[in-house]
Amino acid sequence: MKTKRLLDPMTGFILLHADIPAIIGSLFPDWMDVANNVMCPWHEDKNPSLKIYPDGGGKCFGCGLIIKDVVDLYAKCMGIDYNESQRVLYSDLIDPIPASQIQQFKKLLTGKPLEWLTIERNILPATIARYDIGYDPHDNRIVVPIYDQFKFCRNMRRIAWAKGAKFKVTNTNGHGDCRIYPEITLALNKKVLLCEGELDCLVAQSFGLPAITWTGGAGSWSEEQLPLFRGKYVWVMYDNDDAGRAGSEKIAAILKRYADRVDRVDTSLIRVGKDITDYSFMRPDVLTNMADTIKKFEIKKTEPKPKVCPLCHQEIKR
């Protein structure tokens, strides 16, 4: 029986969002659809022998060349490897923020803004460096790059740290969609703590927690990214205020459709402070205990369900 080929996440995204006929047409102007073959550039083709399918995959009936998908097609035509082809096509789709911009802001994070993060917000210097936190002197804001799991920067959240700012947080123009942060933490961990706000998330990370957040506040989430929670175990720990409690209840109900388990942390029992930053100063044991709880939580292995014949209802032996 032929099994369905599993796609890695980046290729899956490209196949879902790219204008594949346009990419094929740019490489093979004579291609119109799967019904017409094109001249194969990888051998001396006298009659069009290369068939290209709608997903960009193909087969040459002259030289036997097999093309997996549009990423493979682009790689072969451009003379690059598959991974580089992925990154080129993916980058064209998402319009990432240049790495040079991020590194420049990172270099400018010194003095009082850095002291504010480490002393007043309780974020470790190693965590600040790990997530490329920076500073923009033009608007006097802390800069938090929002990377996706492939290390492409999709937004830069600018956070006010000094008094008198008109908006607490602003986004890079055209890049302000709500996203998971840090997405790589969710991708690499089976068990995660979902908290409220980037800075609280960085505090939790400083205490060894696999913390993530949404970049839009307690009442926000991304429908597109909810499937990333499939198979995950999630502890929700939003702020101990009306917005946090309402947001925690709402997102927990939504995540239960995707995650294997969702638990809400009752922060009202902590009795001091209202968020993770407060707890880091006033009750650090709350965070260390939370980290220990998540680390020691055992994921029970589930036996695969037996396949049953739909006609006789007997188990199908493998």
Image (cartoon, rainbow, N blue to C red):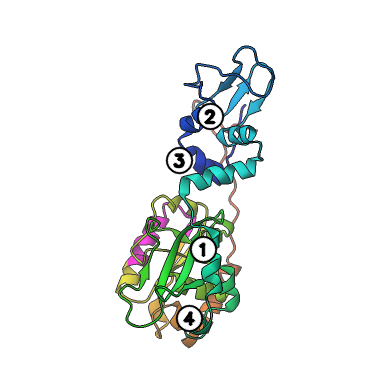
Disc 1 on helix, strand or loop?
Answer: helix
Magenta stretch, main secondary structure, is helix
The CA distance from mark 1 to mark 3 is 26 Å
- Residue on which the image places disc 2: 309
Q: Please, what is the three-letter code of the amino acid marked with disc 4?
A: Pro
- Residue on which the image places disc 4: 113
- Circle nearer the N terminus (2, 3): 3
Whether residues under marks 1 and 4 lie with C-beta atoms below 8 angstroms apart, the answer is: no
Q: Please, what is the three-letter code of the amino acid marked with disc 3?
A: His
In magenta, the rendered stretch is 247-261
In this view, the residue in front, 182 or 155, is 155
- Circle nearer the N terminus (3, 4): 3
Outermost residue to the bottom: 282
Whether residues under marks 2 and 1 lie with C-beta atoms below 8 angstroms apart, the answer is: no
In this view, the residue in front, 256 or 215, is 215
Q: Quadrant of the C terminus?
A: top right
Mark 1 crowdedness (10 Å alpha carbons): few <14, some 14-19, many ≥20 = few
- Residue on which the image places disc 1: 101
Q: Please, what is the three-letter code of the amino acid marked with disc 1?
A: Gln
Q: Please, what is the three-letter code of the amino acid marked with disc 2?
A: Cys
- Residue on which the image places disc 3: 17
Which of the two discs, 2 and 3, sits closer to the camera? 3
Mark 2 crowdedness (10 Å alpha carbons): few <14, some 14-19, many ≥20 = few
Which of the two discs, 2 and 1, sits closer to the camera? 1
Which of the two discs, 2 and 4, sits closer to the camera? 4
User: Residue 246 appears at what percent x and percent y?
Assistant: 31, 67
Task: Check if residue 105 falls in the magenta segment.
Answer: no
Which of the two discs, 1 and 4, sits closer to the camera? 1
In this view, the residue in front, 246 or 275, is 275
